[in-house]
Amino acid sequence: MADSTELDETLARLGVAELDATVRDVRATITPKKRADTAGQRALAVLSQLSGGRSPRESGALTLERTLGQGGMGVVHLGTQVALGRKVAVKTLRPEHRSEATAMQLLREAWITGALEHPNVVPIYDLGLDEGGHPYIILKRIEGAPWSELMHDGEKIRERFGAQDRLDWNLQILMQVSNALGFAHSRGIVHRDLKPENVMIGEFGEVYVLDWGIAVSLRDDGSGRLPLAAEQVELCGTPSYMAPEMLDGQAARLSERTDVYLLGGVLYELMTGRPPHDGDTLRQVLAKVLASDPPFPDGLEPELVRICRRALAADPDARFENAQQLRLALQGFLHRRGSAQLVVEAQARLDRLLHDLAAPDEGSGPRPIARRLHLYNLFGECRFGFQQALKTWRENQAAQDGLVRATAAMIEYELGQGDPKAAALLAGQLASVPPALAARIAEAERASEAERERARNLARIGSEWDFSVGRRTRQFLAAVAGTMWTVLPLTLPLRGVYDTYAGMLILPAAMMLLMIALGWWARESMTKTRINRALMGGALFTMVAQIALHAGSAVLGMPPMMSKVLDLFAWFVITAMIAITVERRLVPAALGYLAGFLVAAARPRWVFCAMSLSNLVLTINMLLVWRAEGRRRAPE
């Protein structure tokens, strides 16, 4: 608090030490002493000439109705401009305060307000003299309430304006007030008495800055109509909101930054619920004005406190340079605050996502599908929140971190599900992927590619051993070759073909040529898979083996009949190998050849019957196997 001697000296210098005993309401405006001057007298004379000696009430152009309110020297009536048929507010002097000095003050208020054509300044419709020669102002009628009645009533704010956030709504109002003052400053006008009571909120949220009665001009326009800041040495303003330079009696220190201080005082009140300078007596309040160090309770938003402290700096040079700078600071705060609120909501979704990700998976089926959808819904909600927060405020580090955490959590989930492709897609949404996570994704992608390659190899192997491919062709070839192989061993011996080795070579050679011809005809089907190639190769190898066996038997000097017996054994071996390596369901055919060999070995004369029967078993075996394969698989 300011030193008591310094305070006494300040009050004495201003000549208002006696006010400490007379001023009871430190939130009321202290007005300067009213003095008449030649400019006021000239203005009154001009208004009298313009009115032609008749007031609007006398001419019927204006009617007055009930009283809307009254202040220290003025009273405001509800009126009607007859020509336009609209309701207006008419401000006149109270009878007990009518004088040339008060008339001049009212005129100056009208001139200042009329010079400020701005959406947040009440429009002046007209200025004139009443029938007693006293000035009046016709203003726009505002249907609403003073800001002071709404500022701390969150429920009323919600009901009347639909605003859910009281602080946000109040800051929006303060930004409009700052805009109005910034406009006034551009015209060289300083308000000097800004407070919530001097701001009116219309029924539809309109914002109007009122009571420019003690405003001063920083520029001399030569008309003498506007009070100059350079001439103001009296104590003037509302003590609870005053800036320190308003007390030191140095008019040169009054500037736009004085109004910035008052804006800071209003900001302080909407944050704390009280004005920056409070006390039981004027002396206590003015001591706080000089100190200009109001306390800030705990729990306030730090950034807003920094803005308010700067606006309330005792040194004008330490404040915002003008009202627009303060407005931009508040606007930036609201953007960042909105972004921060989005982060809080998104973080709640992220916490739920992390909790549900930590829950154990329940295997496959509908429930895991529903779980996956649930997780991605949560992820989408928190990601959208973080992205919106960053859209509002790109430097929001909490939003950046939250977005990375949410995405990383889903990447971990996809890696756990064995889907590195989905993990890589998620990582692509991040501006920067943590190195460790990027390495895991790359490793998982390599492992997945290796697994896909193994699957492709298995698919190729499976297709190579697919019995459904060429099934009908195999059946046709088996039927043709099997029929010939079954019939010929019974007919050719009757013609003596098998009496010599040269004759014995005729059948296998003919069968080999037949198999080659049939294989060429059916090459598309019989070369498509490994199993078809193996069966075709096995058939050709059988013929070649038979020819080689007969040639070898002839060299050894074996009887031709014994060579035919050995044919059955060779066929047994070849069929058994095919059954073991290619198609195990040909085991009956192999056993048939073994039985035929044993019978022929015991009874060589039965060799041709044994061959025919063994070939018949092979033919039936192949047809039955491939027919069953056709039933089990879709037809080619």
Image (cartoon, rainbow, N blue to C red):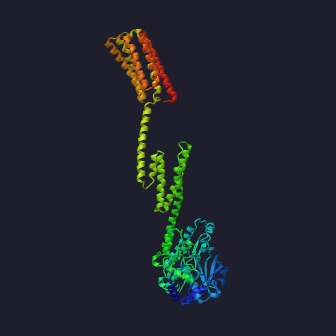
- In the image, residue 477 above or below residue 607: below
Residue under the point 45% across and 76% down: 318
- In the image, residue 368 above or below residue 608: below
From the viewer's perspective, tell me whether residue 366 is left or right of residue 86: left
Residue 51, given in percent of the width and then of the height, sits at 61, 85
Residue 574, can we see it? yes
- Quarter of the view holding residue 607: top left
Residue 578, given in percent of the width and then of the height, sits at 42, 24
- In the image, residue 484 above or below residue 202: above
Residue found at the far right of this picture: 66
- Quarter of the view holding residue 47: bottom right
Q: In this view of the protein, which residue sits in the foreground, 186 or 213?
A: 213
Residue 326, given in percent of the width and then of the height, sits at 49, 72
Q: In this view of the protein, which residue sits in the foreground, 320 or 4?
A: 4
Q: Count numbered badges in the picture.
A: 0
Residue found at the far left of this picture: 555
Residue 495, given in percent of the width and then of the height, sits at 40, 9
Residue under the point 39% across and 13% down: 564
Residue 479, can we see it? no
- Quarter of the view holding residue 78: bottom right
Q: In this view of the protein, which residue sits in the foreground, 506 or 266?
A: 266
From the viewer's perspective, tell me whether residue 139 is left or right of residue 625: right
Q: In this view of the protein, which residue sits in the foreground, 238 or 65?
A: 238
Residue under the point 55% across and 81% down: 285
